[in-house]
Image: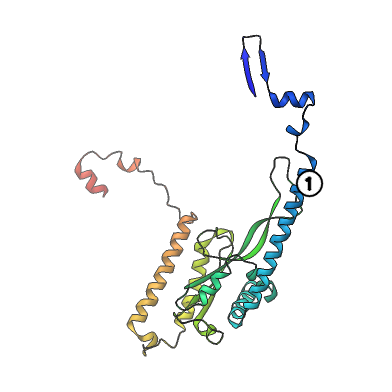
């Protein structure tokens, strides 16, 4: 299409071979797609969705067949901590695209940690229609999913599993080799969640620990006492930092003009000091 504008009167000339053919009716198919083509596109799209759903179902069943005592241990801990049924947790895990991270966690010298987030996630309903502006009506919904912890915003609850050695994780040693924990960071309060986890769970557990391995003196050992003091100090620093960020600590404003207005010579400054 070529358009030209000439003079102040507004003589606008438009030339369009496609438009001319459409207006004269010489070739309607050059402007509008044939209805049969649209129908074929819809059918192909529908068939593609069905094929993808079929593949997803096959993948889920293959993963379900892989579940053993190790997976059952993880599932039971998650179900207890997040207040979901074991069946719900299992369905979530085998549907997760990061399912392979679990196998990497079990492997010898594998991943040191396995993280799960349980928080609100925007999800679009399958029968939701587009708004006039082209957007969709996405509603927040609680979802449990596997994560590396570096790509998604953390706004809810974190459930984590930590390895205690590089040995392969088996159904017989998973309860000894894997530790489980959680901390709540609802509304994105990560510092508060970490502070609560350390002060209310980890430190009391450490101070009640009786067996310190090769250190026979236990809590009487000077190195252990220094370690616990360092952890206490870290939590105290963490608490102060959180309160500063939340503007809980406010410095009073002082009018220094009154103090320095009459300072004229060095002796005045010494007296004021």
Crowdedness of circle 1 by 10 Å Cα count: few (<14), some, many (20+)?
Answer: few
Question: In the picture shown, does residue 194 fall above or below 33?
Answer: below
Q: Residue at x 72, y 52 (%)?
A: 45
Kindly indicate the quadrant of the structure image that contains residue 15: top right
Residue 216 position, x and y percent, is 37, 90
Count the marks. 1
What colouring does the structure picture have? rainbow
User: What residue appears at the point 46 percent right and 76 percent down from the top-left corner?
Assistant: 203
Question: Does 29 sit left or right of 143 as displayed?
Answer: right
- Taking the image as shown, residue 77 lies to the left or right of residue 200, namely right
Considering every residue shown, the one lying at the far front of the view is 26
Percent across and percent down for residue 189 are: 54, 60
Q: Is residue 47 above or below residue 170?
A: above
The secondary structure type at the circle numbered 1 is: helix
Q: Residue at the left extreme?
A: 266
Residue for badge 1: 39
Q: Quadrant of the N terminus?
A: top right
Query: In this view of the protein, which residue sits in the foreground, 183 or 51?
Result: 51
Q: Is residue 111 above or below residue 265?
A: below
**Left or right: 40, with 155 as reference point:** right
Which residue is at the front of the view, 99 or 76?
99
Query: In front: 186, or 242?
Result: 186
The reply to whether residue 105 is in sight is yes
Query: Image point 68% across, 65% down: which residue?
Result: 55
User: Image point 47% across, 75% down: which residue?
Assistant: 110
Asked whether the viewer can see residue 161, the reply is: no
- Residue 8 position, x and y percent, is 63, 9
Image spot of residue 217 (x, y percent)? 36, 89
Task: Name the quadrant containing residue 215.
Answer: bottom left
Q: Quadrant of residue 214?
A: bottom left
- In the displayed structure, does residue 252 sit left or right of residue 37? left
């Amino acid at each position: 299409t070529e358009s030209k504008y000439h003079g102040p009167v507004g003589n606008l000339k438009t030339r369009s071979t496609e438009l001319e053919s459409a207006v004269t009716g010489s070739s309607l198919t050059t402007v509008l797609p044939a209805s049969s083509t649209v129908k074929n596109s819809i059918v192909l799209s529908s068939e593609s969705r069905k094929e993808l759903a079929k593949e997803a179902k096959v993948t889920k069943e293959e993963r379900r067949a892989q579940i053993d005592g190790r997976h059952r241990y993880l599932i039971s801990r998650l179900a207890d901590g997040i207040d979901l049924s074991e069946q719900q947790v299992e369905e979530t895990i085998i549907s997760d695209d990061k399912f392979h991270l679990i196998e990497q966690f079990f492997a010898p010298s594998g991943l040191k940690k396995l993280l799960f987030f349980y928080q609100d996630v925007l999800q679009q309903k399958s029968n939701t229609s587009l708004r006039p502006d082209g957007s969709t009506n996405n509603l927040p919904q609680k979802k449990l999913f596997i994560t590396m912890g570096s790509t998604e915003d953390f706004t809810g609850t974190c459930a984590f599993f930590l390895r205690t050695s590089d040995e392969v994780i088996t159904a017989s040693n998973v309860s000894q080799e894997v530790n489980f924990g959680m901390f709540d960071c609802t509304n994105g309060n990560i510092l508060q969640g970490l502070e609560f986890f350390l002060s209310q769970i980890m430190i009391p557990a450490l101070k009640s620990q009786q067996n310190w391995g090769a250190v026979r003196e236990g809590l009487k050992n000077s190195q252990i006492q220094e370690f616990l003091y360092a952890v206490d100090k870290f939590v105290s620093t963490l608490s102060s930092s959180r309160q500063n960020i939340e503007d809980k600590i406010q410095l009073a404003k002082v009018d220094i003009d009154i103090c320095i207005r009459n300072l004229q010579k060095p002796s005045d400054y010494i007296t004021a000091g």
